[in-house]
Image: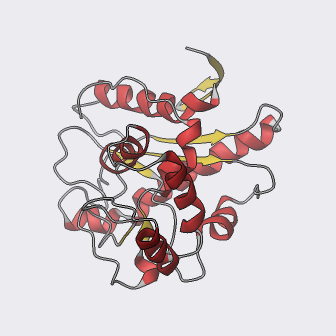
C-alpha cells in the first residue's frame, strides 16, 4: 500500500496516501480497530483531506484535523437521539466511529470548514447537499443512522459506479451541478431527463437522524442530497476489500 506515516503517537495517527485511496484507507483502519475492541467501548474519528500534489501540506493537515473534530461533533449532537433509542447515555455515550472528508478543488478552499461548507453546500432554498460525516457502525448494531457509510454512502456509490441504476455517467455528472440549484430544480431536471432511480429519492428528509426518511414534501431545510457525497468523489474513490461482511 502506498502509505507514508507522518504522526503515530498516543491516539493520534496521520498518514499520506494516494488521493483515490484516502477515504477507504481511513475506513479500513477504523474498522480494524473496531474489530480489536469488539468487546469494549470504542470510539474513533477520522478526517480525510483530498488535495492536489502541490497543495500546502500544513493546510491539508489542519483541514484533516478540522474534519476529524467535525466527526466528533456529530456524535455529541446525536447523543440525545442515541440515548432515546437505548444506544447510549450521557455517562456512557454510544460507542461508534465516524469519518469525514473534503475534496479541495481550486478556488473553493476556506480555512474554516464550517464556513466552507455553508458557502459550498447549502442551497438558497435551505436544502443541504452533504450527509457526511458518516457513521462506521459495528456489524452487530441493529439501529442504523441515516448517514451510514456502509448503507448510505457505499450504496449510492455502487448505484453510480456499478451501474445498478441504468443511466449514463454523463447524467450523473450533470446531477452533481443541478443539486446546487435546489430541490425544485432537481425535481424538474429528473422529469426532463427521464432519470429513473426506482424507489430511491434524490433528496431525503432524515427524521431524528435515524433510519426513517421523510419525503420531498417535507420542509426543504430538512432535506439532504442522497447521492451528492458519492458523486463529488466518484473520480477520487477506489473501493478496497471489506474487513468483513457488513
Does residue 20 appear to the left or right of 140 in the view shown? right
Question: Is the N terminus in the top left, top right, bottom left or bottom right quadrant?
Answer: top right
Residue nearest the viewer, comparing 23 with 195: 195
Residue that appears at 28% across and 67% down: 81
Quadrant in the picture for residue 217? bottom left
Where is residue 160? Give x, y as percent.
Answer: 42, 45
> In the image, is residue 82 above or below residue 64?
below
Where is residue 190? Give x, y as percent.
Answer: 43, 69
Residue that appears at 52% across and 65% down: 129
Where is residue 58? Give x, y as percent.
Answer: 79, 38
Does residue 170 appear to the left or right of 39 in the view shown? right
Q: State how the image is colored.
A: secondary structure
> In the image, is residue 149 above or below residue 107?
above
Residue that appears at 54% across and 50% down: 170
Where is residue 179? Give x, y as percent.
Answer: 54, 67
Does residue 104 appear to the left or right of 163 in the view shown? right
> In the image, is residue 34 above or below residue 120?
above
Looking at the image, how many numbered discs can be counted on the residues?
Answer: 0
Residue that appears at 48% across and 48% down: 230
Quadrant in the picture for residue 3? top right
Question: Is the C terminus in the top left, top right, bottom left or bottom right quadrant?
Answer: top left
> In the image, is residue 229 above or below residue 44?
below
Amino acid at each position: 500500500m502506498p502509505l507514508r506515516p507522518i504522526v503515530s503517537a498516543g491516539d493520534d495517527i496521520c498518514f499520506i496516501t494516494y488521493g483515490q485511496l484516502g477515504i477507504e484507507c481511513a475506513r479500513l483502519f477504523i474498522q480494524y480497530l473496531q474489530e480489536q475492541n469488539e468487546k469494549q467501548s470504542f470510539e474513533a474519528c477520522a478526517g480525510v483531506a483530498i488535495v492536489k500534489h502541490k497543495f500546502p501540506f500544513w493546510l491539508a493537515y489542519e483541514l484533516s484535523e478540522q474534519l476529524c473534530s467535525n466527526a466528533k461533533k456529530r456524535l455529541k449532537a446525536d447523543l440525545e437521539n442515541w440515548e432515546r433509542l437505548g444506544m447510549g447515555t450521557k455517562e456512557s455515550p454510544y460507542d461508534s466511529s465516524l469519518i469525514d472528508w473534503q475534496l479541495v478543488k481550486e478556488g473553493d478552499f476556506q480555512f474554516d470548514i464550517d464556513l466552507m461548507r455553508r458557502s459550498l453546500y447549502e442551497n438558497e432554498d435551505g436544502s443541504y447537499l452533504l450527509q457526511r460525516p458518516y457513521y462506521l457502525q459495528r456489524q452487530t448494531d441493529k439501529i442504523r443512522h441515516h448517514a451510514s457509510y456502509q448503507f448510505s454512502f457505499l450504496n449510492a456509490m455502487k448505484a453510480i459506479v456499478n451501474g445498478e441504476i441504468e443511466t449514463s455517467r454523463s447524467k450523473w455528472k450533470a446531477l452533481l451541478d443541478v443539486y446546487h440549484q435546489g430541490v425544485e430544480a432537481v425535481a424538474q431536471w429528473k422529469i426532463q431527463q427521464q432519470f429513473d432511480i426506482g424507489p430511491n429519492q434524490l433528496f431525503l428528509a432524515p427524521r431524528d437522524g435515524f433510519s426513517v426518511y421523510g419525503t420531498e414534501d417535507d420542509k426543504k431545510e430538512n432535506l439532504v442530497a442522497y447521492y451528492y457525497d458519492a458523486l463529488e468523489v466518484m473520480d477520487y474513490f477506489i473501493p478496497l476489500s471489506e474487513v468483513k461482511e457488513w
